[in-house]
Amino acid sequence: MARLALGDDDKKARDWFCEEMSSLGCDVKVDAMGNTFAVRPGKNAGPPTAMGSHLDTQPTGGRYDGILGIHAAVEAMRTMRDAGYETKYPVAVVNWTNEEGARFPKSLHGSSVWAGDLSLEAAYALKDVADPSKTAGAELERIGYKGTLPADARQNPLAAHFELHIEQGPILEGEDAAIGVVSGGQAYKWLRCKISGRDSHAGTTPLAYRADAMLGAARIIAACHDVAAKHSGVATTGILTLEPGSINTIPHTVEFTIDIRHPDPAAVRAMEADIRTLSSSLLQTGNKWECKVDFEEMFDAPAAIFAMECRDAIREAAIASVGEGKVRELVSGAGHDSCSTSKHCPTGMVFVPCKDGASHTPVEYASPEACANGAQVLMDAALLFDSRREK
């Protein structure tokens, strides 16, 4: 599945979501970032207890990442409607814009604006990685989802945020666990690295006379792996471009991304410092021609710690559904919109196992049983939280 943010297919999914939520009696509103809030009233007025995730995917994304959380929340609303259940306070389903950051390179794009971590102007200015003539702001307007509601947690608050998601890793499946109670998310940072060298003929330029940007990039990318291993973190290069792009010409410019992650923010900083230091030394040849390196910070996400009251509600709901022996607490290795919401309201995440821990790939799969378990726990945890609210 390839449903990149703010494309025509994303619009179709958004239209479906709005129509479905309206048919279930929800008041649907869209904020200035396209984040969509479907609110069902409760006995008392107040900010809603939300269940949220996203509908956009990676270029070769699976059918469960984010999408499971939205579908489960929609079904929770349908179940409440069909049962005639009235919550103590309003409840909501939220579809956050461009969680993936695949088309417009800013992870947690919409929720970061809502949380105040990214200005609306900067969010609108992000360019399509495949077609820089298109900006996020222009595409929001084109598909009709640049709403009028302020994209601001202070003006559009949530009482809590619960999110169901596939684990995207192998731990739950490996331990035969059915539900993961997520304690928080690890810190991560995105860097863009630019290597500038000298283009010259591949056949007539001796090795000692080269400033080969591709060779420099390869050395740095390999070094990133070693740095990550040293700090027990992870490092990934997911995008790489080079110029001029000719078989028999040494590249003069290479740009690539570096994604570094670790549960400890201090370790992320240490990894970045090591990568920057090593990059400069790896490009020093002692010859007349040398490459230069420049770094640009693209995104910096601190570690998130989820609220104990939400984790307790999830754990209680999970034990009731699958039994205590099938419940495990773990840290999310990926970033999620819940990391943004945790800065403004109590937040919790429910993980279910996915086959071989695979995600961001067409073979991504979660069994119907796993999806059903997660959906049940999501709804029950949100309703438990609602029933315990004082305001």
Image (tube, helix red, strand yellow):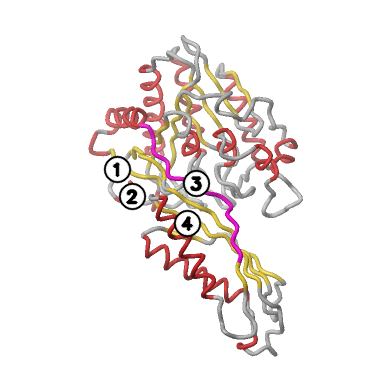
Give the residues drawn in magenta, as a range.
294-307
Task: For mark 1, give the secondary structure.
Answer: loop
How far from the left and from the top, in percent, is residue 132?
Answer: 73, 52
- Along the polypeptide, which appears first: circle 3 or circle 2? 2
**Dot 1 amino acid type:** Ala
Q: Residue at x 57, y 49 (%)?
A: 58
- Along the polypeptide, which appears first: circle 4 or circle 2? 2
**Dot 3 amino acid type:** Ala
Q: Residue at x 52, y 17 (%)?
A: 40
- Along the polypeptide, which appears first: circle 1 or circle 4? 1
- Along the polypeptide, which appears first: circle 1 or circle 2? 2
**Dot 2 amino acid type:** Ile
Q: Residue at x 52, y 27 (%)?
A: 93
Find disc 3 in the rendering and name its residue: 301
122 w.r.t. 34: above or below: below
Q: Quadrant of residue 315?
A: top left
How far from the left and from the top, in percent, is residue 214?
Answer: 61, 74
Labelled pair 1, 2 in contact (Cβ < 8 Å): yes
- Label 1 and label 4: CA atoms lie apart by 28 Å
Find disc 2 in the rendering and name its residue: 171
Furthest toward the left, the residue is 325
- Label 3 and label 1: CA atoms lie apart by 28 Å
Labelled pair 1, 4 in contact (Cβ < 8 Å): no
